[in-house]
Amino acid sequence: MAITLKRADIFLVRGTSWLSGAIRFVTRTIGESRTQVNHVGLIVEDGPLKDVDMVEAVTTVKHHGLWAKYGPPSTDSVAIYRPMNLTDEQIDLIVDEALRQVGKSYGYFKAVAHFLDWVLLGAYVFRRKAKSERYPICSWLVADVFKKAGKHFGVAPGAASPDDIWDFIQAHPDIYEMIHPLKPLEAGEEPPA
């Protein structure tokens, strides 16, 4: 039986490019363990892993197939987690809010603000000033739509990095069920035992 995903499942990516590595480097804070992921997005429909659509902020906010982007031949590692504490109404709100972001331009200034705060040892200064909803980045998109449903990842949406979301999910296995471990997607994936 192939893996079945549900709306509002969160996917996190550990990319293999130099940019992915740079993002992981600058989102790590002093004393924190090595950053595992550099990108995050949201599943927006129920269905088999190979067929579901997602919303992610890259050069723009895009609505497209998860498998088409991260399945073979991609070598990026992908983890998928299911929030277990959402009502049907909250799931509807999260997905609707994510889909409303589609087409918006990427928040390059927000990405620069994350870097500038990293230079300030993680202070939430520049990210607080870059809070415009018109230009999302991946972690803001996920954190903001969850905030609208009354959920959080332990930090303000504007301060959230993919690593913050990863750390929160890892610290709360009672709330987030692992659907796929952090590894490349492969043909014939089976659910974890």
Image (cartoon, rainbow, N blue to C red):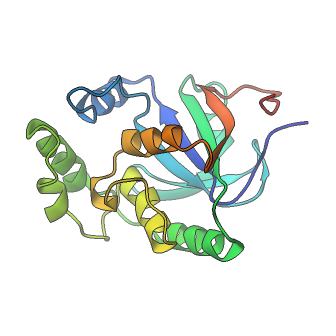
85 with respect to 52 (left or right): left
The part of the image, by quadrant, that contains residue 190 is top right
Measured as percent of width and height from the top left, residue 123 is found at 13, 47
Point 11% across, 55% down: residue: 125
Q: Nearer the viewer, residue 156 or 171?
A: 171
On screen, residue 169 above or below 46: above
Q: Nearer the viewer, residue 25 or 70?
A: 25
Point 56% across, 54% down: residue: 42
Residue positioned most to the right: 1
State how many labels appear: 0
On screen, residue 113 above or below 179: below
Measured as percent of width and height from the top left, residue 107 is found at 28, 57
Measured as percent of width and height from the top left, residue 151 is found at 49, 64
On screen, residue 80 above or below 84: above
23 with respect to 73 (left or right): left
The part of the image, by quadrant, that contains residue 115 is top left
**Quadrant housing the C terminus:** top right
Measured as percent of width and height from the top left, residue 159 is found at 27, 54
Q: Nearer the viewer, residue 170 or 4?
A: 170
The part of the image, by quadrant, that contains residue 36 is top left
Residue positioned most to the front: 174
Point 12% across, 37% down: residue: 121
Q: Is residue 117 visible?
A: yes
57 with respect to 96 (left or right): left
Q: Is residue 103 visible?
A: no
Point 17% across, 42% down: residue: 122
**Quadrant housing the N terminus:** top right
